């Protein structure tokens, strides 16, 4: 008699074994298959000036200009910034009781997180007028959007997908790389169907599958800001923005005097 293994294709055979493993309720056991991530480095395409006093927490590019959220109590703000000159075109101050964090734009509105207050704000994109305030549990770190929902990090390995109308959690994922949790997820940007996340206190950005939480790639930005441009107040890399119209990726950091347009390239192993 011919064996089942020789008659059935491997994929179909795996499906049979999975069905046999189902419990009586019909639900299959959870199976997590580690995904090998791709490593990238970068090349600088262009360098732009950036306000050295800006403690960058959130960054995005829209309609030819940058929008930036800066942090620290008493120094937090929302800004509209000219890319070429680094000049602040429009700005509002955030009340000193708040340490502002991530920033995202969705349907003509800006959304901004705060670090420890569990408060988020919605602003009119054109006037920067505060329109609404929302609450959430835990800390607020990074914020971006897939065009439908807001996507939020909180410093752990968790990423939440939020309803923009009330900040309720629609779903969440846990980010893993080679089967291990990835923590300190900070500034976020949604790029070509992936979530880019800066890892706080490092020069690393990870590319995350928004469905599974698997890390698809890691980007090493070591050496991006030269030592000659650093001083005692220069802080960590934090600030990712993307221009889909021209496929440009921008990177900066907290109190960095420069903002960089970069191009990714696979890292030699």
Image (tube, helix red, strand yellow):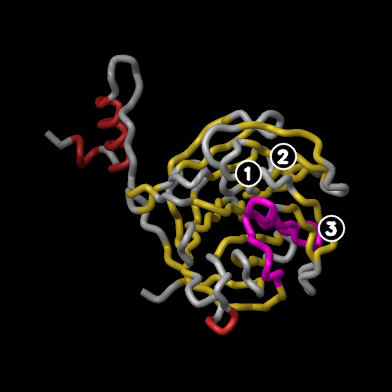
Q: Position of residue 236 (x, y in %)?
A: 53, 65
Asked which quadrant contains residue 246, the reply is bottom right
According to the picture, the residue beneath numbered tag 1 turns out to be 114
Report the side of 36 relative to 200 (left or right).
left
Mark sitting earlier along the chain (2/3)? 3
Mark 2–mark 1 CB contact (< 8 Å) = yes
Mark sitting earlier along the chain (3/1)? 3
Residue found 69% across the figure and 52% down from its top: 74
Q: Nearer the viewer, residue 92 or 154?
A: 92
Report the side of 121 relative to 126 (left or right).
left
According to the picture, the residue beneath numbered tag 3 turns out to be 90
Does the magenta-highlighted stretch encompass residue 71? yes
In this picture, is 260 found above or below 8?
below
Distance between mark 2 and mark 3 Cα atoms: 17 Å
The residue positioned farthest toward the right in the image shown: 127
Secondary element under disc 3, as helix, strand or loop, is strand
Secondary element under disc 2, as helix, strand or loop, is strand
Residue found 62% across the figure and 71% down from its top: 256
Q: Nearer the viewer, residue 118 or 37?
A: 118
The residue positioned farthest toward the left in the image shown: 1
Q: Position of residue 232 (x, y in %)?
A: 55, 74
According to the picture, the residue beneath numbered tag 2 turns out to be 121
Distance between mark 2 and mark 1 Cα atoms: 9 Å
Classify the position of the N terminus by image quarter.
top left
Residue range corresponding to the magenta coloring: 50-75
Q: Position of residue 248 (x, y in %)?
A: 67, 67
Mark sitting earlier along the chain (2/1)? 1
Q: Nearer the viewer, residue 80 or 248?
A: 80
């Amino acid at each position: 008699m011919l064996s089942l293994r020789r008659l059935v294709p491997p994929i179909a055979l795996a499906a049979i074994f999975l069905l046999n493993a189902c419990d009586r309720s019909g639900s299959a056991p959870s199976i997590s298959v580690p995904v090998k991530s791709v490593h990238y480095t970068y090349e600088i395409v262009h360098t732009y000036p950036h306000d050295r006093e800006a403690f960058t927490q959130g960054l995005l590019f829209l309609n030819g200009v940058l929008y930036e959220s800066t942090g620290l109590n008493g120094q937090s703000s929302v800004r509209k910034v000219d890319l070429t000159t680094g000049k602040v075109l429009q700005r509002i101050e955030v009340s000193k009781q708040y340490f502002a964090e991530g920033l995202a734009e969705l349907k003509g509105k800006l959304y901004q997180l705060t670090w420890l207050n569990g408060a988020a704000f919605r602003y009119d994109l054109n006037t920067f007028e505060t329109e609404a305030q929302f609450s959430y549990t835990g800390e607020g770190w990074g914020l971006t959007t897939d065009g439908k929902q807001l996507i939020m990090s909180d410093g752990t390995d968790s990423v939440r997908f939020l309803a923009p109308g009330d900040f309720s959690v629609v779903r969440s994922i846990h980010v893993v790389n080679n089967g291990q949790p990835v923590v300190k997820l900070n500034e976020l940007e949604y790029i070509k169907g992936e979530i880019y996340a800066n890892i706080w206190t490092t020069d690393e950005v990870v590319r995350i599958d928004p469905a599974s939480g698997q890390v698809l790639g890691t980007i090493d930005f070591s050496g991006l800001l030269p030592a000659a441009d650093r001083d005692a107040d220069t802080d960590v890399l934090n600030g990712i923005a993307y221009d889909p119209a021209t496929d440009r990726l921008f990177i900066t950091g907290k109190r960095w005097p420069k903002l960089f347009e970069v191009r990714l390239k696979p890292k030699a192993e």
